[in-house]
Image (cartoon, helix red, strand yellow):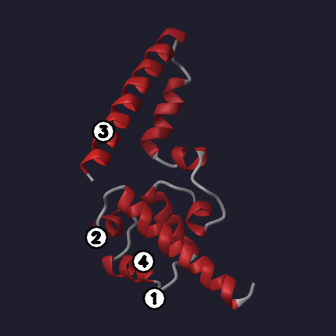
Amino acid sequence: MNKESEKANAAKVVSRIKMRRRELKLTQTELAKEANLTPAAISQFESGTRKPSFKTLSSLSDALRVTTDYLLGKAEKNYNDLLADPKVNAMFKGMMKFTEKDKETLYEFYEFLKTKAEAQAATTEETC
């Protein structure tokens, strides 16, 4: 790997850590606590002055509820990232035991939440 691609990969990690933290509406201090790191370390990772070790990257991916491949820029967010969220993972495992009627009710609730989110997004766009 040449120096330019190393810099590009490092920039991708920096960008994805910061972007995902903001998506989750976490402060650097909150992310640090979730990942068992210091706020200074998060700041250094996000500014690109320090690179996370693999162990640290693994802790960050758990705290940010995505895969390490996503943080490294080797994959886009996908189903595996969704399952990296412990709450979502527990829901999916529990849903496997649902009756077909319960699954249909859950799907209707999903459609309701999706419509609500779309309406909120449209309202936000109108006010911008």
Marker disc for residue 120: 3
Residue drawn at (38%, 36%), measured in percent from left and top?
Answer: 118
| Mark 1 or 2: the one toward you | 1
In three-dimensional space, the C-alpha distance between marks 4 and 3, rounded to whole angstroms, equals 30 Å
In three-dimensional space, the C-alpha distance between marks 1 and 2, rounded to whole angstroms, equals 18 Å
Q: Residues within 10 Å of mark 3 (few under 14, many from 20)?
A: few
| Figure check: 31 above or below 38 | above
Residue drawn at (40%, 65%), measured in percent from left and top?
Answer: 35
Q: Residues within 10 Å of mark 1 (few under 14, many from 20)?
A: few
Q: Earlier in the sequence, mark 3 or mark 1?
A: 1
Give whichever of 128, 64 is nearer the camera: 128
x%, y% of residue 116?
A: 33, 31
| Mark 4 or 3: the one toward you | 3
Q: Earlier in the sequence, mark 4 or mark 3?
A: 4
Q: Secondary structure at mark 4?
A: helix
In three-dimensional space, the C-alpha distance between marks 4 and 1, rounded to whole angstroms, equals 8 Å
In three-dimensional space, the C-alpha distance between marks 3 and 2, rounded to whole angstroms, equals 29 Å
Q: Secondary structure at mark 2?
A: helix
Query: Looking at numbered disc 3 in the image, what kind of residue is underneath it?
Result: Gln
Disc 3, disc 1: CB below 8 Å?
no
Q: Which residue is mark 1?
A: 49
Query: Looking at numbered disc 2 in the image, what kind of residue is underneath it?
Result: Thr
Q: Which residue is mark 4?
A: 46
Q: Which residue is mark 2?
A: 29
Residue drawn at (33%, 34%), measured in percent from left and top?
Answer: 119
Q: Secondary structure at mark 1?
A: loop
| Mark 3 or 2: the one toward you | 3
Residue drawn at (68%, 90%), measured in percent from left and top?
Answer: 3
In three-dimensional space, the C-alpha distance between marks 4 and 2, rounded to whole angstroms, equals 12 Å
In three-dimensional space, the C-alpha distance between marks 3 and 1, rounded to whole angstroms, equals 38 Å
Give whichever of 113, 97 is nearer the camera: 113
